[in-house]
Amino acid sequence: VSDELVERARNGDVDAFVELVARRERSMVRIATAILGNEADSDDALQDALESMWRKLPSLREVDRFDAWSDRILVNACRLALRRRSRPRMAQIPLDTYHLANDQQVPLDDQIAERAAFDRAFTLLGPDDRAVLVLHHLEGRSVREIADALAIPVGTVKSRLHTARRGLERSLLEEQG
Amino acid sequence: MIDDDEIRGMLEARAGSPGYRLTDVARAIATEHPRDGARPTLRLAFSFVAGTAVIAVLALIFVVLPGRSQRSLTPSSPPSMAATSRPLASASVTPAPVPWEALTWYSGDDGRFEQPRQNVFVQSVEYWRDAWIAVGMGSTSRAVTWRV
């Protein structure tokens, strides 16, 4: 993201802000949906995050840190969405499940069962653990980038990644056994 | 053990693919919502107004209202005294019963000081003209003033 674009958005340029969001759109939607697990909650969190970004942009001092800054706002919005979640949770099965089944020669029922088990295990994790797993494994962020985005020490990121992964494995083992 | 690829695959499936354009939402928000920092002068003005309002409320609670309640305890003075005199000093005292023999009661009816007929509770003592005046309540709950 160019510093000049961020600077223009800071000064109230709506088109510049929209351009900034367009460049991060895919990543933001994936992060929110992966952390929250359904589109309805994800939509709410994304809207809150965008509103917060727009309002707080003038207070962003280091324009070159826009990506990390916007990640932090989005993760905070997801955290709030998890806290106030009141709607019934639903398992969503993406439409591309059928194609995955054809590609991998794995029975559709088994794939759906595996995903459901993963979702249940993932849902047992806290928001912070979910965030580090998603940023690292889904978005490919380095430990240092995650530390920067979440404003926590590198050691804490490593420890959270380890704890989250162990929690995930333990839950999946309990599902199988 | 679950490996990195499995976690990534499951998270990919969980995330799905974006089904709508986030940019439309961003444009609507940016167009419709005022932003922090866009109007620093307005924020400063709001802070000033809010601060002044807080100070005014505190002044009302701690200065004006106690003064009004104290005045309400003091009976009306004779015209000759009220026009020319003003308390020169005052001291708060803990309300306590005072033997009526120690006080002179100002009745407020005929401008004369008399002995009170009962024990009274002194609320404050003020120096008025050349005498200390005790202000308080009698057991009949009537506001009275005594010369000490």
Image (cartoon, coloured by chain):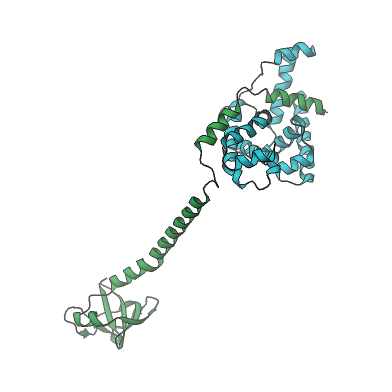
Can you give x and y, in whole percent of width and height, for residue B147 in the image?
28, 84
**Chain B, colour shown:** green
The chain assigned the colour cyan in the figure is A
| Residue in the foreground of this view, choosing between A101 and B31 | B31
| Residue in the foreground of this view, choosing between B48 and A128 | B48
Decide if residue A122 is in sight here: yes
Can you give x and y, in whole percent of width and height, for residue A145 in the image?
76, 40
**Based on the displayed image, in which of its 4 quarters is residue A135 positioned?**
top right
Decide if residue A106 is in sight here: no
Q: Is residue B129 above or below residue B39?
A: below
Number of dots carrying numbers: 0
Can you give x and y, in whole percent of width and height, for residue B127 in the image?
33, 84
| Residue at the (54%, 36%) spot, across then down | B30
| Residue at the (75%, 13%) spot, across then down | A101
Left or right of residue A170, residue A60 in this image: left
**Based on the displayed image, in which of its 4 quarters is residue A11 positioned?**
top right
